[in-house]
């Protein structure tokens, strides 16, 4: 299944977005990749200034300093690891940048692989506040492209898949529930905003 946006909600100050992707690998492959900033950098086109060792595991409270393109412009960001549940989720939030963003990536074992949900809450300010429609378009493109890269990257680095996984990766997959009009994955992630789990506030 290609990455797709299953929810986009807008207001006067920004927007929230939920995107989903199925990856025909084992859950520990996803967990291992998302525990290190190197993978996120490859998938979402960010260039790190810190940490200098981007293959070290991320822990709660760790800071990521990077530059990222927003259309033709480049901005500096600092994000911290606000929460991490091994084998289940990773939450990041900005402390510097043109957006106040909270991003949570959750993953769960599904039939034939892993179902990944990207959920982001973006509050625009500064030069991006009055460019909200443009910012939404760029965010949609960046998130879906990043999740597609994630899928290809994990497949290329994973060990030989089981026959069931090979069937999902190379053949016609069954129509996922999300394509039939509903969100799949864990109910709590598919139907709530990223602010639902606020252990991040204690960081």
Image (spheres, rainbow, N blue to C red):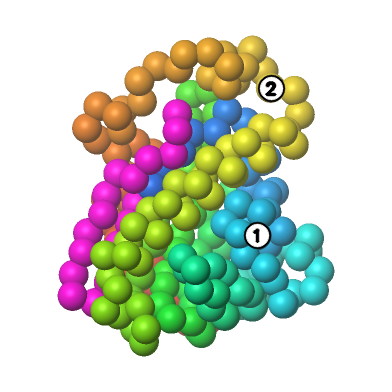
- Residue 79 point in image, percent of width and height: 55, 76
Which residues, given as a range, are shown in magenta? Answer: 1-18
Image-quadrant location for residue 67: bottom right
Instruction: Report the residue at 54% width, 59% height from top.
Output: 90
Q: Nearer the viewer, residue 15 or 114?
A: 15
Q: Relative to 11, does residue 8 appear above or below in the rendering?
A: above
Q: Using the numbered discs, state the Cα–Cα distance from disc 1 to disc 2 in whole angstroms.
A: 25 Å
Q: Nearer the viewer, residue 139 or 104?
A: 139
Which numbered disc covers residue 41? Answer: 1
Q: Residue furthest right?
A: 53
What secondary structure is marked by label 2?
loop
Q: Relative to 65, does residue 1 appear above or below in the rendering?
A: above
Compared across the picture, whether 114 is left or right of 35 comes to left
Q: Relative to 36, does residue 110 appear above or below in the rendering?
A: above
What secondary structure is marked by label 1?
helix
Which numbered disc covers residue 161? Answer: 2
Q: Is residue 70 visible?
A: yes
Total of numbered circles in the picture? 2
- Residue 1 point in image, percent of width and height: 45, 29
Q: Mark 2 Cα within 10 Å, few/some/many (few <14, many 20+)?
A: some
Image-quadrant location for residue 169: top right
Q: Mark 1 Cα within 10 Å, few/some/many (few <14, many 20+)?
A: some
């Amino acid at each position: 299944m290609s990455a797709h946006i299953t929810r986009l909600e807008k207001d006067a100050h920004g927007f929230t977005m939920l995107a989903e992707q199925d990856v025909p690998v084992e859950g520990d492959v996803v967990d291992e990749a998302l525990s290190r900033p190197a993978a996120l950098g490859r998938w979402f086109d960010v260039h790190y200034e810190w940490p200098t060792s981007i293959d070290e595991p991320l822990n709660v409270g760790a800071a990521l300093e990077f530059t990222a393109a927003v259309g033709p412009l480049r901005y500096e960001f600092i994000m911290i690891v606000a929460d991490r549940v091994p084998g289940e989720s990773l939450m990041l939030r900005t402390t510097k940048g043109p957006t106040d963003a909270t991003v949570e990536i959750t993953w769960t074992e599904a039939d034939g692989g892993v179902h990944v949900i990207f959920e982001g809450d973006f509050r625009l300010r500064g030069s991006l506040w009055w460019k909200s429609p443009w910012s939404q378009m760029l965010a949609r493109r960046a998130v879906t492209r990043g999740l597609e890269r994630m899928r290809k990257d994990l497949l290329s680095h994973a060990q030989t898949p089981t026959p069931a996984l090979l069937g999902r990766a190379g053949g016609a997959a069954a129509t996922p529930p999300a394509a039939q009009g509903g969100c799949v994955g864990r109910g709590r992630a598919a139907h709530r905003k990223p602010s639902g789990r606020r252990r991040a506030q204690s960081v």
